[in-house]
Amino acid sequence: MNLSPPPYRPKNSFTRWLDDRLPVIRLLHDVIGGGYLVPRNLNWLWNFGVLAGIALTIQIVTGLALAMHYVASSSEAFNSIEGIMRYVGFGWLIRYGHMAGASLFFAALYIHMFRGVYYGSYKAPREMIWLIGVLLFMLAMATAFLGYTLVWGQMSYWAAQVITGLFSVVPFVGEKIRIWILGGFSPNAATVNRFFVLHFTLPFVILAVVGLHVWALHRKGSGNPTGIEVQKPEEVVPMHPYYVVKDAVAVCVFLLIFCSLVFFYPNAFSDPDNYIPANPFSTPAHIKPEWYFWPFYAVLRSFTVNFMGIPAKVWGVLGMGLSVIVWGLLPWLDNSPVRSGRYRPLFRCFFLFFLADMLLLGFCGKQPAEEPWIRLGQWASLYYFAFFLVILPILPLFEKTKAVPFSIDEAENKRTDA
Amino acid sequence: MPSSEKSLPKDMDRRDFLNVAAVGLTGIGVCGAAVPFIAQMNPSKDVAEQEKTEVDISSVQPGQTVKVVWRGQPVFIRNLTEQEITEANAVAMSDLRDPETLEQRTKAGKNNWLVTMALCTHLGCIPQGGNAGEPKGEYGGYICSCHGSAFDTAGRIRRGPAPTNLTVPPYRFISPSVISIG
């Protein structure tokens, strides 16, 4: 179906003049304005891409402000942040905003990703959107880790030690790579400096990759909850004003939650140990990452014995790496011809169980490395990988899907009639 | 037609060859230029050449462990008790993930002095068991609370994700009561 969106028409002589020389308004019109046609049946889960974008903007703006006061040095970093909290005008607001923003960024990303899994958003012809999205997720993880170390509290220091330790599993040159990344034998002055530079740079890389994500999205158009492609002009509405206004409502709710966190629960997601300055000679009794890494941390800890001639440590790191990479393989793991989970009853059960499993994994990752959490984490990891690598590929072989309607119109009319 | 052109593959004329050569050389040049930018991230000289650490161990009582600093990293120096030595020697090699005897991990005639890096070989946390009052784990040596690795009285890995025994750094006794690490 080739829909012809309403073209951009400059309204006055200035915009006509500008459009001829640098068509930036036309670009906006085509990308997020009346020139982008979107299925009319999107539900609220389709708001989280924009919300992630808003969170990224909050992070960049608060981050730029923080960078004007932060001192990237192992002796000054911790104190400079306490200075931001106490002496810099509105420093407390900006820093708490940056902390809450990080959590909400990941919350939005996770909902956005689970939306994609449930509605099969990754399936042909939208694989590139999905792949770029997984890349964005990885970049966000790297940026969050780097930023967390900058505080140079106890958790920061030991996060830097443990996460760079992951590289030591590379055969032969692992330890060399670890030392190269750190610029020393353990996290030190050079580490803070380079991590600051990278933490400052990566968000702009993310911004550029978001551009690719949106570009790929516009090539094939937005999906929708039915998973049926648009066939008639009546099934779409222009992005502006319809979804721009709907997104604005979502942004209001989002900012409400953001402000509640900043003003009432600023340390809800932070670890008290990170308010102790970094001490290279004492590891906190219970180290754990920020909440958005807990599920992957649980996978890392689930490998406790050597098997198949490969040490437990290597399995753990491989397992954790695979637990992220496997998201990128989804378009090729799930071969069901039916796109949306709405018409796949069996998939829906496994998906809900997968959601619960993610929460359980996260819970295990939060707990100390003791029983029963290790054993529970192992079972949860097993289902995590089984869902991606076994259940999704073989499900289409015996799943009896519901009848998929012929068009978005038919599907939505049926829903409103019922 | 110059004879040199005849040696080129059929579908490749002189212009193609020049293109490939120019792009190829540019690639090599870029790789060369990248070397200093990658190398600058290695530890700088003042970090890399941190000297030896000398430690007076005369005041370390049997059963006591001290933590010292070498190259910015913590090192355990443990004075093993008779019982801990007996325990370590009683372990069958087949029970070990990284088989080593206490003898191999200490200096001859100084079997009671266990000198190891105080960094878990899994991901580099400092295991507990070095300070008085800390848990030593079920094997009586050290326990890493980060990811649950337990070490015995010879600092050997017994349980958990760590792949190898606690690393023994290069050191020597420069007198009966002073060791030099590094």
Image: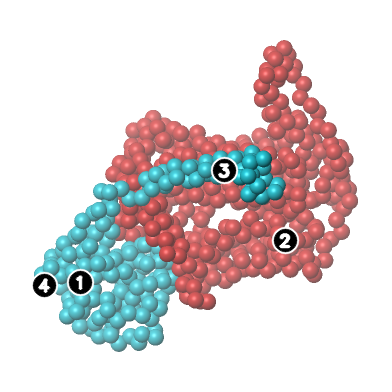
Visual hue assigned to chain A? red
Q: Which chain carries label 2?
A: A
Q: Which chain carries label 3?
A: B
Label 3 residue SS: helix
Amino acid residing under circle 1 = Gln
Residue at x-position 45% and y-position 65%? A171
Estimate the x, y position of residue B20 in percent, counting from the top left: 60, 43
Q: Nearer the viewer, mark 3 or mark 1?
A: 3
Specify few, some or many for label 4: CA neighbours under 10 Å numbering under 14, 14-19, or 20 or more: few
Q: Nearer the viewer, mark 2 or mark 3?
A: 3
Visual hue assigned to chain B? cyan
Q: Is the Cβ of the residue at disc 3 closer than 8 Å to that at disc 4?
A: no
Q: Which of A216 and A305 is in front in this view?
A: A216
Amino acid residing under circle 2 = Asp
Amino acid residing under circle 4 = Pro
- What residue is pinned by disc 4? B176
Residue at x-position 33% and y-position 66%? B127
Estimate the x, y position of residue A275 in percent, counting from the top left: 35, 49
Q: Can residue B125 be seen in this view?
A: yes
- What residue is pinned by disc 2? A334
Q: Nearer the viewer, residue A156 or B155?
A: B155
Label 2 residue SS: loop
Q: Give the numbered dot on residue B21.
A: 3
Q: Is the Cβ of the residue at disc 2 closer than 8 Å to that at disc 3?
A: no
Residue at x-position 58% and y-position 38%? A208
